[in-house]
Image: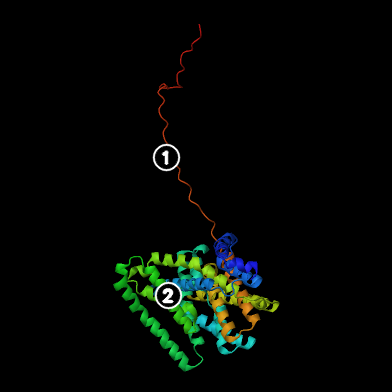
Amino acid sequence: MDPLHAFFDTELGYLAILFALFVVPRVLQRWRLPTAITSFALGAVAGMGFGLFENSPTLHLLSTFGIVALFLFAGLEVDLHELRLGALVLVQHLFLRLLLLAIVSYAAMRLFGLEFRAAALMALALLIPSTGFILDSLESFGLTREERFWVKSKAIATELLALFALFVVLQSTSAVELGLASLALVGIIVLLPPLFRLFAVQIAPWAPKSEFAFLLMIAVVAAYATKRLGVYYLVGAFLVGIAARRFRQALPALASERMLHAVEVFASFFAPFYFFVAGTELRRGDFTLVSMAIGLAFAVIIVPVRLGAVLLHRRIALGESTGHSLRVAVPMLPTLVFTLVIAAILRDQFGLPAPLFGALIVYTILNTTLPGFFLGTPTPTFDAPELPPAVPEPEDVSRGAGGPPERPPATFPL
């Protein structure tokens, strides 16, 4: 083993990785570069440049926590009451998204010779926003309360549609396999409420402040279960978040604002490991002039189409101006997590050619960095320090009523 690999197998080496993942991305944020992209790039340098961490069980476990936490957080944000407030607009939005998925799937079949399932997955990778990543970034865009509502609602509704489509596409090799997988998924959904109820009645009263650990472990178990079903970790974690939100009345702590904040903080800690590990799995052969040209073409064609669809729909449905619609459309551009997950599935299960795999990576890096440059990051503001109240000067008894203090009489030596 060479000295570099030996160093990164030590505790000091892992401390160096921790420093790189938690300090370097924060430093680069001032140039509007998302921390996820920086973590991904650090992983790419480690993997493609030095061949590090190819089979690190520690980093893979930490990355699993990261992806589970991201989709658990997204599931906890699903508020059916809020979705019903904009139901008509959201249904129209989903119809347009389905239409785009069908068009892009057909184009992928014709242009790249992909079979239907692979083409449908590529369309999902190109069109579906990454809800957990977007929700985590909303505060940095300076949006109004109404704009945040629409971005959040549309991203969540689109993810619900995408996860259903992902499940159907991956399990549609035969009617029997689809039926069995559907039964297993329904079993997971049916099992979650009794588990939450059992915890609320039998455990929570005697184990205060254990809600976070219980929620996270259930999410990890459900994520592994759906991974075994062939639909990756994200479906199980997302379902647990939705179930916890629905169980809010019986055990409010499971979906309280405090719990949301705790899961968000947990995700912000572990998500960099997911992006770092995803970067280490890249290979130099994935990035050629052809793949970069295709990825750039994806960005030039798909990004304006996605923006235009939102602008046109909101102009017709809500009579909204282009400027206001852009502030809703641009934050929904990032596809980072969804594209990384589906690109890996396409490569590992469908033998996606390296140029197309690399093109998807180039495309998602471009669309994930765009919102920061379009909307910017608000300039940091700091509260002015409060000065302590002035302390009155002590009264000088030597002062007269109306003038300077009297001088003592002069004395002269005899």
Looking at the rendered structure, the kind of residue marked 2 is: Ala
Question: Regarding mark 2 in the picture, which secondary structure is present there?
Answer: helix
Looking at the rendered structure, the kind of residue marked 1 is: Pro
Which residue does the numbered mark 2 point to in the structure image?
219
Location of residue 195 (image quadrant) = bottom left
Q: Is residue 241 visible?
A: no
In the rendered image, residue 67, in percent from the top left (x then y), is placed at 50, 73
Mark 1–mark 2 distance (CA, rounded to whole Å):
52 Å
Residue at 39% from the left image edge and 68% from the top image edge:
212
Q: Is residue 349 visible?
A: yes
Quarter of the image for the N terminus: give it. bottom right
Which residue does the numbered mark 1 point to in the structure image?
389
Categorize mark 1 by other alpha carbons within 10 Å: few (<14), some (14-19), many (20+). Answer: few
In the rendered image, residue 23, in percent from the top left (x then y), is placed at 56, 60
Closer to us: 16 or 273: 16
Question: Regarding mark 1 in the picture, which secondary structure is present there?
Answer: loop
In the rendered image, residue 109, in percent from the top left (x then y), is placed at 60, 88
Residue 19 versus residue 364 in the image, above or below: above
